[in-house]
Amino acid sequence: MDELHEARFYEPLQGGRVRCALCPHLCHIADGRRGVCGVRYNAGGRLYTLVYDRVVSRNVDPIEKKPLYHFYPGSKAYSIATVGCNLRCAFCQNWEISQWPKEHLPKRMAPGGENETPEPICRWLSELEAVIPGEPVTPQAIVDAALATGSTAIAYTYTEPTIFYELAYDTAVLARERGLKNIFVTSGYIGAAPLRELAKVLDGANVDLKYFKEESYQRISGVRMQPILDAIRLYHELGVWVEVTTLVVPGVNDSDEELKAIAGFVRSVGAEVPWHVSQFYPTYKMLDRPRTPAETLRRAGAIGRAAGLRYVYEGNVPGVKGEDTYCYHCGSLLIDRYGFYVRHNRLRVGRCPDCGASIDGVGMSG
Ligand code: SF4
């Protein structure tokens, strides 16, 4: 890393502090400190992203793995992530990379409080290359690699892409110019202004709706719920293709009441918005409960369909057929999947071959 990349969406405050407005945490960050996400750093009254050129994970995934089931089904997504996250979910399945900055970067740069002895930026720069994990990248190199793999889209995923906004945005602009699509797989904790800007170059998003209780969002994930509901609506209103995922966690969000509330919210955004209810497995700090039973996912699926949703998927359990797409009008099987793979797609120019109903989504030509 030769130089730090200045962050977007912040304003300087008195005394060398800054206020970051990239996400609803709205961190006030003292000189020499990082924000809650751990990867935005105030050096001398200017805010920098620490992850503009350092990708910790990249893979070619089936688009169904995001999961997006109504976005170029059966295509490939070149998927990238940096370290860092603005949430701290106790059941995070990618916690080694999402929580890495909070657990590994020097405590003197930890967020919160006054920093009486800020580290000189030159000292930090000399250390940076050694501590931020990942391969050096540029937006151009990411786009070239995506094209070389025959991917349809670039997915900004695994950790929370909002916190590597500058890298994702610059890559997405280049990707668009080269005919690639762009996808966010996100918790939805993003400010309205950054989202409006992002939507100009974004084609699809899978947004988590983890609970429908403010208390759960704050206690288990460290964020507020309302900004996430607002972001889901805004993604949809701005013309980004949206699918919603809920990880159904036993004893946390698996009551009929909460699942009905989540399904009702998704229905209020649009009957055509796919809802993925997926299986929890014990991980990270939530090891005290079992995997989600398949019958719980079936119950959640039935609740979603009863709420009026056209497409509900019971995911993470290959072989139980909860990942197939059916026609909302006549009930015919349209896309036969096994896990993340499309075995057979019967769609004809985006329509059901049996009744002719138009099937919602992007790139659904079959
Ligand atoms: S993006 Fe990071 S620094 Fe900015 S407000 Fe969110 S948590 Fe704070």
Image (spheres, rainbow, N blue to C red):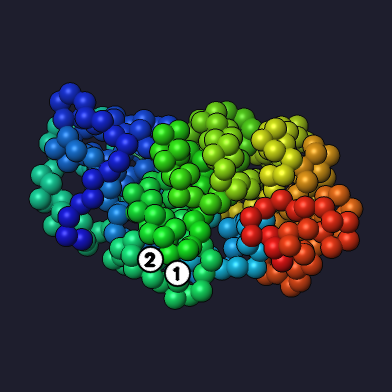
Residue 12 image-quadrant placement:
top left
Residue 362 x %, y %: 63, 55
Q: Which three-letter amino acid code belongs to the residue tagged 1?
A: Ala
Q: Is mark 2 within 8 Å of ligand 1?
A: no
Residue located 17% across and 55% down the image: 3
Say which of 1 and 335 sits in front. Answer: 335
- Number of numbered labels in the structure image: 2
Going by the numbered disc 2, the residue's amino acid type is Ile
Circle number at residue 142: 2
Q: Percent x, y for residue 277? A: 70, 49
Is residue 284 shown above or below 111?
A: below
Residue at 31 percent of width and 47 percent of height: 39
30 vs 214, left or right, is left
Q: Residues within 10 Å of mark 1 (few under 14, many from 20)?
A: many
What secondary structure is found at the residue carrying circle 2?
A: helix
As drawn, 251 above or below 53: above
Q: Does residue 243 appear anywhere in the picture?
A: yes
- At horizontal 51% and vertical 41% (from top left) the residue drawn is 188
Tell me where residue 281 appears, x and y as whole percent: 63, 55
* Quarter of the rendering containing residue 346: bottom right
Between the C-alphas of marks 1 and 2, the distance is 6 Å
Considering depth in this image, is 146 or 305 the residue closer to the camera?
Answer: 146
- Please, which residue is most extreme toward the top here? 14
Q: Which mark is residue 146?
A: 1
Image coords of residue 322 (percent x, y): 77, 58
Query: Where, quadrant-wise, is the N terminus in this rendering?
Result: bottom left
Residue 211: image quadrant is: top right
Q: Are marks 1 and 2 in contact (CB under 8 Å)?
A: yes
| Residue at the spot 45% in from the left edge and 33% down from the top edge | 192
- Provide the secondary structure element on which disc 1 rests: helix
From the viewer's perspective, is 47 left or right of 343?
A: left
